[in-house]
Amino acid sequence: MKQKSKGFTLIELVVVIIVLGILAVVAAPKFINLSQDAHDASIKSTFGSFTSGVKLYHSCWLASGKSGYQVDVSCYGDGTLDSGVTGFPLGIDTTLSESGTRLQGKFCKEIWQGLLENDEYTLESHGNNTFDKSDDIIYWYSGGVLSNANTYCYYNYIADDRTKDAKNWVLKYYPNTGKTEVEKGVLSYP
């Protein structure tokens, strides 16, 4: 009588190992990329909150019945965020804004802090050459006179990739129109 063997042959074992190896090679990049996906989701959500804050602020300004440049619009947040002449957030201490017609770099940080009531991200101005591992977002502005179409604040999220010429998520905020844009862009270091 012949005895039946139980178990795997060596060839079957090798085939199973090869199949598992192929699956690991195919699946590994997906699991490795989860960290980047988490960064992307987090900053897109925060940028979305910023955009919602701009709209809520402007609605508050409209509902107040006032027009033009306003200091300390009281119906939004803690009431310290000033508006530009078109009613969109401009900053907290805007005494140097020429009655809400000019943008300055410090205003961009004040807008961020006034619209988003959290300290989740560390902001640093673009003019500072000492970007370190604690900085999450580099901010500054382009232009100056609010009525110019190219005047905006930008917030470049560098927490996921601080290498020179890396493409990172950028939020541009145009305080004259309230428009926001989110795109991938390169931060040119000063």
Image (cartoon, rainbow, N blue to C red):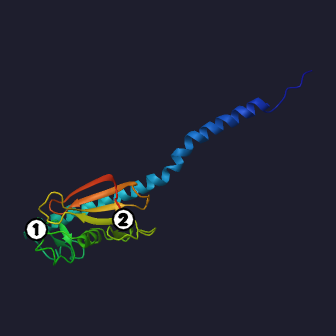
Task: Measuring from the top left, give residue 163's x and y in whole percent.
Answer: 44, 58
| Along the viewing direction, whichever of 188 and 69 lies nearer the viewer | 188
Secondary structure of the residue carrying numbered label 1: loop
Task: Measuring from the top left, give residue 99's x and y in whole percent.
Answer: 10, 74
**Residue 68 located left or right of residue 184:** left
Q: Which quadrant holds the C terminus?
A: bottom left
The residue drawn where x is 53% and y is 45% is 29
Relative to 20, does residue 146 appear above or below in the rendering?
Answer: below
| Along the viewing direction, whichever of 137 and 114 lies nearer the viewer | 137
Answer yes or no: do the residues labelled 2 and 1 have beta carbons within 8 Å?
no
The residue drawn where x is 24% and y is 76% is 78
The part of the image, by quadrant, that contains residue 65 is: bottom left
The residue positioned farthest toward the right in the image shown? 1
Task: Measuring from the top left, give residue 132's x and y in whole percent.
Answer: 44, 69
The residue positioned farthest toward the top in the image shown? 1
Q: Which circle marks residue 137 in the picture?
A: 2
Amino acid at circle 1: Val
Residue named by callout 1: 85
